[in-house]
Image (spheres, coloured by chain):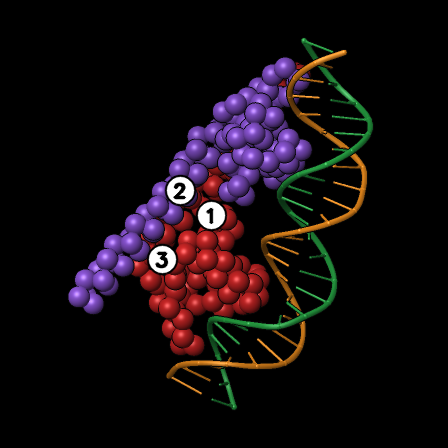
Chain colours: A red, B purple, C green, D orange
DNA sequence: CCTTGTTACGACTAACGTAAAAATA
DNA sequence: TATTTTTACGTTAGTCGTAACAAGG
C-alpha cells in the first residue's frame, strides 16, 4: 500500500484521466500507468476501466477512494503537525536564551 | 511519507528497540536504522533518542505515533475491504451462472 | 488521424543484507 | 566486554523518462 501510489490513484480518480493526472503530479503518463498497474496488482483488482475517451472507476476504486483520501489527508496533516510542534519548541528555546 | 517506513516506525515505537523491531519485521537491524533515518530526514526531525540500553520517543514521535497508527490501520482495512467486496461480487457472478 | 493509454528499455535511485565499526552500559 | 545501533558497500529491485506502439473516437 505505497503512499505515493495512493496519491497517483487519487489524481487519476479525480481527473478521470491518466494524462491529466500526470500533469498534476509532474510525471509522465507512462509513470502513471505503471503506478496504477502496480497498485492494481498489489490489491489484485482492477481500479479503472480505461478507454481513450473516458476512464471509469470500478467498485474497488470506489472503496479505495475513501480510504486513500483519508490516508493522504492524515499523512499531510502529520507532517504539518510535526513541523508546527517543532517550530513551537524552537520558539521556546529562543525564549530560554533570553 | 512512505507507508512501509511508517510500519517500521510503529514497530520501533512499540518495542522501544531497533533490533526487536527488526525481528518482528523480518529484516536486519541496519535496514531498520536506515528506514528510521530516512523518515527522520523526510520529516526533518529526530524521532528516537537512541542508546544501547534504551530507545526513547521524542515529542515528534509522539505526534507521529497517532497518525501512523491510523494510517496503517486504514491501509490494512482498505485491503481487507476491497478483498471482501471482490469476493462478494464473485459469489454474485457464480449465482448468475447458475 | 489525433488523442489517450500501454509497452519496452536504459538510466538512476532506493532498499536490503553482510560485514565491520562505534557506542554505551 | 557484551549488547545495540550505525556505517560501508555490493547487489537487487523499483521508479522514472524517452521513444515506440496500440487502441478508440
Q: Is residue C10 above or below residue A76?
A: below
Residue identifier under label 1? A1
Which element is circle 3 on? helix
Subunit under mark 2: B
Residue under the point 23% across and 62% down? B94
Q: Is residue A24 above or below residue C4?
A: above
Residue D4: quarter of image: top right
Q: Which quarter of the rendered picture does the C terminus of chain A lie within?
A: top right
Q: Identify the mark at residue A61; answer none if there is no mark.
A: 3
Residue under the point 47% across and 41% down? A75
Does the image show residue B37? no
Q: Is the C-beta separation of discs 1 and 3 under 8 Å? A: no
Residue under the point 57% across and 25% down? B20
Subunit under mark 3: A
Does the image show residue B51? yes
Q: Is the C-beta separation of discs 1 and 2 under 8 Å? A: yes
How much space separates mark 1 and mark 2, taking CA atoms? 8 Å
Residue identifier under label 2? B76
- Extreme residue in the front direction: B98
Q: How many marks?
A: 3
Which element is circle 2 on? helix
Amino acid at each position: 500500500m505505497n503512499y505515493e501510489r495512493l496519491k497517483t490513484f487519487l489524481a487519476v480518480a479525480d481527473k478521470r484521466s491518466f494524462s491529466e493526472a500526470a500533469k498534476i503530479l509532474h510525471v509522465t503518463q507512462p509513470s502513471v500507468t505503471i503506478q496504477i498497474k502496480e497498485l492494481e496488482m498489489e490489491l489484485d483488482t482492477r481500479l479503472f476501466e480505461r478507454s481513450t475517451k473516458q476512464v471509469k472507476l470500478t467498485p474497488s476504486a470506489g472503496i479505495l477512494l475513501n480510504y486513500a483520501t483519508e490516508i493522504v489527508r492524515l499523512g499531510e496533516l502529520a507532517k504539518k503537525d510535526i513541523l508546527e510542534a517543532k517550530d513551537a519548541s524552537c520558539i521556546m528555546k529562543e525564549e530560554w536564551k533570553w
